[in-house]
Amino acid sequence: MLQLHLLHFRSIFVWAIMFSILTGWLIVSAHRFDDDAAAGMSTQQAALPAGADPAALERGALAAFEDFARLQSRWDLGFLAYYHPQAAIHLHRILPDGRAETIEYRTRGWKNLQKHWAPSSDREDSPDTPAYNGIRTRLEGNLVIVEGRRHVESENHTGPYKAALVQTPDGEWRIIEEWIESQLHAD
């Protein structure tokens, strides 16, 4: 009877060690670009100026978004300046096996990831850069929402896109929250 209990205890102990090793390996091997994951709804911190003209706000936010998209299409890392310091980025990735995952980033982590992805040479109209279409804006509470479709040629994927922009005290427009979809393909 004692041997049976020891055998049972040994098998539980072995499984616990294997689980600990696997967990440690997963933690160490995960390549993180962000120290503090996006907590979501950073948009709650934003505020639009009181008494502002809604149409003018939408035009201003759209103009800033168009500048952002133009820089991004050239892999000009100047597009990163359009992110608010407290931005939350939600990257929804469709995996090759059909499953999906959402990875959350804050501004610093997202900027580091974009710098990592950036090509080493200057090239115009890279197939890796997104193109936006069907863009429309709307005022929602204290934000201007930009929505449309985002296409990346190298992924052969077009998916939904949404960004919440806030006007800073200096009158500049910044992305405070962004929702992106991408498609990963098996290599």
Image (cartoon, helix red, strand yellow):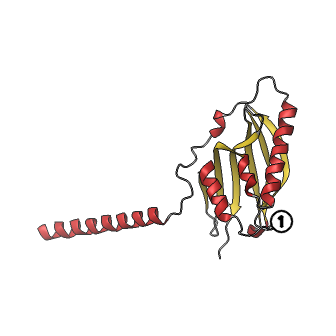
Mark 1: give few (<14), some (14-19) or many (20+) Cα within 10 Å. some
The residue that label 1 is drawn on is 125
The single residue placed furthest to the top in the displayed view is: 51
Quarter that holds the N terminus: bottom left
SS type, badge 1: loop
The single residue placed furthest to the bottom in the displayed view is: 187
**Figure check: 166 above or below 147:** above
Q: Pick the residue in front: 14 or 5.
A: 14
Judge whether residue 92 can be spotted in this image.
yes
Q: Which residue sits at x=77%, y=38%?
A: 172
Going by the image, does 75 lie left or right of 11? right
Where residue 124 sits, quadrant-wise, is bottom right
Instruction: Where is residue 147? Give x, y as percent.
Output: 79, 47
| Number of callouts | 1
**Figure check: 29 above or below 43:** below
Instruction: Where is residue 165? Give x, y as percent.
Output: 74, 40
Going by the image, does 39 lie left or right of 84? left
Where residue 146 sits, quadrant-wise, is top right
Q: Amino acid at mark 1?
A: Asp
Quarter that holds the C terminus: bottom right
Going by the image, does 134 lie left or right of 23? right
Q: Which residue sits at x=67%, y=67%?
A: 184
Q: Which residue sits at x=62%, y=57%?
A: 112
**Figure check: 150 above or below 172:** below
Where residue 61 sits, quadrant-wise, is top right
Instruction: Where is residue 66? Give x, y as percent.
Output: 84, 49
Instruction: Where is residue 75? Give x, y as percent.
Output: 76, 61
**Figure check: 15 above or below 37:** below
